[in-house]
Amino acid sequence: YAKQSDRTVKQKLFSDLFRQTRFLGLIGGKMKLKSKDVAIAGLFIAIVAVMTFVPMLGMIPLVFLSVNVVLVPILVCAQTTNPLVSVIVSTFFGLFSMIRAYVNPAGAGILYFAVQNPLVSVLPRAMIGLVAHYSYRGLKKLFKNKTEEDELSYGFGKRLKKNAIPSVISAILGTATNTLLFLGMLVLIYNGD
C-alpha cells in the first residue's frame, strides 16, 4: 500500500512538471521534434562540441573564468530554430563544458571544481537558448508592429529595425543569462567555501 502512495505522488509531481514545461512549449502541445529539427540540432551540437574541446577556439581561458565565444552558434540556433532545439543545443554546451572541466581542469581556470558541478555548468546554460529564443521572437514582433506603423522607415532602416535590433538585443540577453545564472549559481552553492 505504501508503494502505491509513493507512485501516486511521483505521478502527480510528473504531471505538474509536464504541465509547466507544456506551458513553455517544450513538451507536448504544438512543439514536436521533426527529423529536420534533429538534423539541425545535431549540426549545432557538433559545432558547439568542436568549439568547446578545441583549445583557444570557443572557450578562451583567462585566470578565473573562460571567455565563451561558443555562445555565438547557440544564439544563432536560438534565433533560427524552435525553443526545444535551442534548449537542447544550449544544454549540450553545459554538458560539454562540464566534461571539459573533468578532462582538462587547467583549461577551465581556477574554478574548475565549480564547473564540474552540473548545477553550475549545465542548468544555467540550458536557459540560454530559451531566453534568447523567446526574447528574439517577442522583440521581432514588437519591432514588426512598430515599423509597420512608422511611415518614414523605408528600405534598409526598416530591415534593420525588424531583424538586426531584435537579434542584437536577444544576443545580449542570452549572454547576460549565461553570465548571471552561472555566477549566481556559483555564489549560491560555493558562497562559504
Image (spheres, helix red, strand yellow):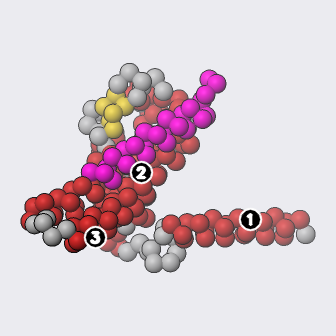
Mark 1, secondary structure of its residue? helix
Q: CA distance from mark 2 to mark 3?
A: 26 Å
N-term-proximal mark, 1 vs 3: 1
Amino acid type shown at disc 3: Asn
User: Which quadrant, please, contains the C terminus?
Assistant: top right
Q: Is residue 37 visible?
A: yes
User: Which quadrant, please, contains the N terminus?
Assistant: bottom right
Mark 1 closeness class: few <14, some 14–19, many ≥20 residues within 10 Å: few
User: Residue 107 or 65: which is nearer the viewer?
Assistant: 65
Q: Is residue 190 above or below residue 162?
A: above
Q: At which x and y percent is residue 25? A: 48, 70
Q: At which x and y percent is residue 93? A: 40, 47
User: Residue 146 or 192: which is nearer the viewer?
Assistant: 146
> Nearer the viewer's eye, disc 1 or disc 3?
3
Please tell me the numbered disc located at residue 10.
Answer: 1
Q: Are marks 1 and 3 in contact (CB under 8 Å)?
A: no
User: Residue 20 or 54: which is nearer the viewer?
Assistant: 20
N-term-proximal mark, 2 vs 3: 2
Q: Which residues are magenta?
A: 168-193
Q: Which residue is mark 2?
A: 128
Amino acid type shown at disc 1: Lys
Q: CA distance from mark 1 to mark 2?
A: 29 Å
Judge left or right: residue 118 versus residue 46: right
Mark 3, secondary structure of its residue? helix
